[in-house]
Image (tube, rainbow, N blue to C red):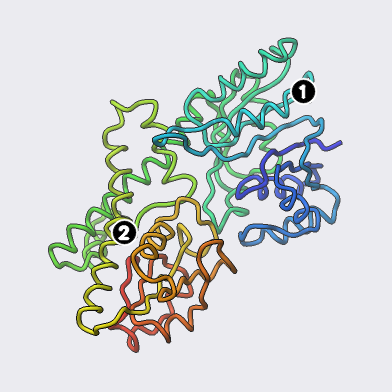
């Protein structure tokens, strides 16, 4: 029997499972996708993340990690499933509820149940009530806590080990039990709090970053109209000892920064004016980028009397990963493909082999055969573009 069951084997669930297993702890990873389960049981991975392939291969070969579509009894259960939207950016906790429902029959006296999924404030309490309503005999006999991840895609394996964690239980005993568990494989500090504070902490961290990025993106809009180089401006402003402006881009994506602020806004609409405005601005930046690209295309058509071949470089939500969730670059690509012949667009994304909607083009071909090149994501491959040769057709929305 596995000591730990992790429900959800995605961008956080799989690295977490591999990390725990690497410490000699028997882990059963559970996912509803049979293909994902089969891939992991072969010692392979279905996502791109540095060092993850090595960790999974070793853990599977040692027998400490096994994947399945059905959970079995264990001592610790981790819920690491997505929390998507419903309606107008309303957080949907049905994935969490469904995952919990599968675990409820397996719970026994002394078990530890941990929710890691990003959640609206109060979700852990709702899950507690859900468990105890079905298993009232377990009240005061199991431990329930919330512990959000704090990792950067592209560096997940390192940060899962070394980053500090905030852990909040439904009571002091649950908090202490969860801290004892994480201390077995986390080297960062483990800070104790309650479940609601831990839930809000996760949301606030990413809302703060969203607001800071919004300031940089707003500067880029102002500088474009004022004909000022925003990159030079930010570099000079950051020479001030107490100023640290972030870099603008074509928007904000990913499963955290582009999502978590809505979890606050949905429950506290009247109190989150700044957070809501920042979210609107960062969303607008992608639409602004679409308009800029369309204007460049129109100018080419008017001067050259033909439709240009366009290269859109980058589809992921941030540099050097394959994650397309909430990606502004992907949104831009979709919008441009609606107004420009798809056969005249090169979609360049070095981190993925194929896409269900867009045919991926190698960077070298795109650079050689296109008339206009738009860099949407600062992938390392794009930093080596020889702009001295093709500078007249390269337009970058990110700092290279």
Residue 332 sits above or below residue 393 on the image: above
The quarter of the image holding the N terminus is top right
User: Residue 396: image x %, image y %?
Assistant: 33, 70
Instruction: Return the mark for residue 391.
Output: none
Q: On the picture, is 117 further left or further right than 371? A: right
Observer-nearest residue: 155 or 214?
214
Residue at 64% x, 43% y is 186
Q: On the picture, is 108 further left or further right than 353? A: right
Residue 219 sits above or below residue 86 on the image: below
The quarter of the image holding the C terminus is bottom left
Say which element carries label 2: loop
Residue 63 sits above or below residue 360 on the image: above
Residue highlighted by disc 1 = 105
Observer-nearest residue: 229 or 88?
88
Residue at 74% x, 55% y is 56
Observer-nearest residue: 62 or 264?
264
Verify CB contact (< 8 Å) between mark 2 and mark 1: no
User: Residue 291: image x %, image y %?
Assistant: 26, 62
Residue 34 sits above or below residue 346 on the image: above
User: Residue 255: image x %, image y %?
Assistant: 49, 46
Residue at 63% x, 18% y is 130
Q: Residues within 10 Å of mark 2 (few under 14, many from 20)?
A: many
- Would you identify the image quadrant in which residue 237 lies? bottom left
- Would you identify the image quadrant in which residue 140 lies? top right
Q: On the picture, is 147 further left or further right than 225? A: right
User: Residue 188: image x %, image y %?
Assistant: 58, 43
Q: Nearer the viewer, mark 2 or mark 1?
A: 1
Q: On the picture, is 266 further left or further right than 355? A: left
Instruction: Return the mark for residue 248.
Output: 2
Q: Residues within 10 Å of mark 1 (few under 14, many from 20)?
A: few
Say which element carries label 1: helix
- Would you identify the image quadrant in which residue 180 lies? top right
């Amino acid at each position: 029997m596995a000591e730990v069951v992790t429900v959800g084997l995605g961008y956080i669930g799989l690295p977490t499972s591999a990390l725990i297993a690497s410490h000699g702890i028997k882990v059963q990873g559970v996912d509803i996708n049979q293909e994902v389960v089969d891939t992991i049981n072969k010692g392979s991975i279905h996502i791109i993340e540095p060092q993850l392939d090595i960790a999974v291969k070793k853990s599977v070969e040692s027998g400490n990690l096994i994947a399945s579509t059905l959970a079995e009894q264990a001592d610790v259960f981790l819920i690491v499933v997505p929390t998507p939207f419903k309606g107008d950016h309303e957080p949907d906790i049905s994935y969490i509820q469904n995952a919990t429902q599968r675990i409820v029959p397996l719970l026994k006296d002394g078990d530890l149940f941990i929710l890691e999924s990003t959640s609206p404030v109060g979700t852990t309490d709702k899950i507690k009530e859900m468990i105890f309503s079905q298993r009232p005999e377990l009240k005061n006999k199991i431990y329930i806590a919330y512990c959000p991840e704090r990792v950067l895609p592209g560096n997940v394996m390192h940060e899962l080990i070394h980053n500090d964690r905030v852990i909040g239980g439904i009571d002091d005993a649950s908090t202490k039990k969860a801290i004892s568990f994480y201390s077995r494989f986390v080297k960062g500090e483990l800070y104790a709090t309650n479940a609601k504070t831990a839930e809000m902490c996760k949301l606030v961290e990413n809302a703060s970053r969203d607001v800071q990025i919004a300031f940089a993106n707003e500067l880029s809009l102002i500088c474009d109209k004022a004909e000022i180089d925003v990159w030079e401006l930010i570099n000079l402003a950051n020479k001030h000892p107490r100023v640290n402006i972030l870099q603008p881009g074509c928007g904000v994506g990913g499963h955290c920064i582009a999502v978590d602020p809505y979890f606050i806004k949905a429950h506290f609409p009247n109190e989150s004016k700044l957070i809501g405005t920042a979210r609107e601005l960062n969303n607008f930046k992608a639409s602004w980028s679409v308009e800029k690209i369309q204007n460049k295309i129109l100018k080419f058509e008017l001067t050259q009397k033909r439709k240009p071949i366009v290269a859109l470089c980058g589809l992921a939500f941030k540099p050097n990963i394959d994650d397309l969730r909430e990606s502004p670059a992907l949104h831009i690509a979709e919008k441009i493909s609606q107004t420009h012949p798809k056969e005249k667009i090169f979609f360049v994304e070095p981190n993925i082999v194929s896409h269900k909607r867009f045919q991926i083009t190698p960077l070298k071909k795109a650079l050689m055969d296109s008339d206009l090149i738009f860099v949407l994501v600062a992938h390392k491959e794009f930093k080596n573009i020889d702009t001295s040769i093709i500078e007249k057709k390269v337009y970058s929305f990110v700092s290279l």
